[in-house]
Image (tube, grey):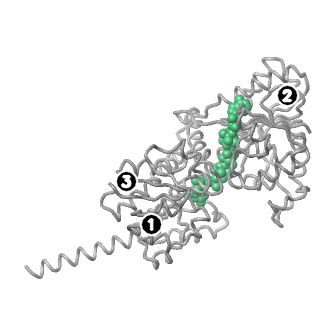
Amino acid sequence: MNVTIIGTGYVGLTTGVTLAYLGHQVICLDVDKEKIEKLHQGISPIYEPGLEHLMELSKDQLIFTADYEKAVLEADVIFLAVGTPPNEDGSPNLTYLNSAFEACVKYIMLGNRKVLLVNKSTVPVGTAESFHQRLVFMGLQSIVAIASNPEFLRQGRAMHDTLYPDRIVVGGDESSIKLLRELYTSIIKQSFEEPAEIPRSVSLKEVPFIAVDRSSAELGKYAANAFLAMKISFINEMSTVCDKVGADVNNVAKIIGADPRIAPQFLQAGIGYGGSCFPKDTRALHHIAKTNGYSFKLMSAVIEVNNRQKYVIISKLRESFETLKGRKIAVLGLTFKPETDDLRDAPSIPIVKALLDEGAEVSVHDPVGLEKALALMPAGIDYSNSIEEVVSNADAVAVLTEWEQYKRLNWITVSALMRNKVLVDGRNALDAENLREIGFEYYGIGRYSSYNKKQVHKVAKLGAKEITMGQG
Ligand code: NAD
Ligand code: UGA
């Protein structure tokens, strides 16, 4: 089929490249001419493992352009995959989507050819219906059909998740569903040849194709993200309870995750969820419920817990230092998760800001996120590509993203370079026992350390009192 993708971000580019790899003729359009220029050179404007490789394999099926006319005139299916960032009040900003829709409609009218317009961006319930109503108003409903096809890929795993998704969800009328089922046949049947760099799991035989009405597809996307975010906030609250009672949250997660009704995924305690989606989509769902007259209490709690969780790093550091003023804190990892260069809504941003507010000197490292960090991080911090430089003379290290590189670091060398050997592991990603053996004062999230420290204080206080009493 002739497929056009509007928006070459994490979702659009991945979808376009995958569909081209599967044999469709794909045009990817973006209004950002710099991105299109890079794509013409075979360079991906985003960091996503395996993407450039698949781009190269599919180059004969792929065109990149900034010209709407060229992109839309011959298309059978057009995907809208532009950003829907949050407004101040949490509602999604649909400016980019509306403008992409209008531009497509303009050239569809010119081409006067039947086309299916599919929304892949995450949008409030009723968006597809409102597009449909606009088409009816313009008398175009017989040539343009509207469908919803929400995306469930994870950044850092985008190519894998697009080739081997857990499910494909489509909302629309019968003929739109039929066309999309056809478009995705080789993914549903897993009949394509797996790319060497992105192997298929042996157990994957067929991908569920879930065909529903447009509103359920739209709401289902928010529900999926909100549920995963809820699991994270739950385990993060448990980590605080663990710190208070002297239990290990990793063990608690293991115990509950062994129950298939709970499942082990998304029970990793840490500094809270970030990224361009969970924070935005939890707020959007809360907002959607509110504007429809319902106060979604569970969602507000999930959001509140996540906002608070980021500052756990500061309280852990305060357990070692009375004040952070003048202390050098080395931050390892800035992106919202590993294997991406994305810092949108990354917990590292408010954490670094809080450290600066406390008067700390902050130096930062990230394997791929430094360029994007420059635009998003507060002023007054030191950036370096060298971990040695960042940790030199540091009073404490805070690991904020669990990059493999940090897990495999020679921590003996790191400790030798530091002024004080305090380590806060914001992702519970490191080997606590080994680090303590090296001589680090190690703090995880909900992993005994804070509790033990309080016990030591209690005993010390008790001892001091006994001496005083004895002397009296
Ligand atoms: P992104 O910001 O990475 O990319 C969006 C692209 O759209 C940008 O390149 C931008 O230049 C382009 N664009 C903006 N306005 C345009 C217009 N009028 N015409 C053409 N191009 C335009 O966004 P993303 O992360 O790919 O997310 C896109 C949508 O998919 C969002 O609604 C998001 O919530 C949803 N989503 C994202 C992910 C993810 O992991 N990033 C996963 C699932 C769903
Ligand atoms: C998430 C969903 O997993 C995707 O299914 C969805 O398509 C996407 O949002 C979206 O709508 O954009 P993504 O944001 O790329 O994907 O990354 P996740 O792996 O879900 O992680 C999100 C955040 O949660 C990260 O900051 C991560 O560190 C944090 N997290 C994740 C935890 O703190 N604990 C966990 O156990 C898992």
For disc 3, the neighbor class at 10 Å (few under 14, some 14 to 19, many from 20) is many
Residue type at mark 2? Answer: Lys
- 26 vs 395, left or right, is right
Rounded to the nearest angstrom, the CA distance separating label 2 from label 1 is 54 Å
- The answer to whether residue 55 is above or below residue 258 is above
Using the rendered view, name the quadrant where residue 95 is placed.
Answer: top right
Label 3 sits on residue = 360
Label 1 sits on residue = 423
Residue 316 in the image: state x and y as whole percent: 40, 62
The local secondary structure at tag 3 comes to loop
Which residue is outermost to the left? 472
Residue type at mark 1? Answer: Leu
The local secondary structure at tag 2 comes to helix
For disc 1, the neighbor class at 10 Å (few under 14, some 14 to 19, many from 20) is many
- 370 vs 5, left or right, is left
The residue lying toward the viewer, choosing from 252 and 443, is 443
- 231 vs 73, left or right, is left
Task: Count the labels in the image.
Answer: 3
Label 2 sits on residue = 70
At x 80%, y 40%, the residue is: 40
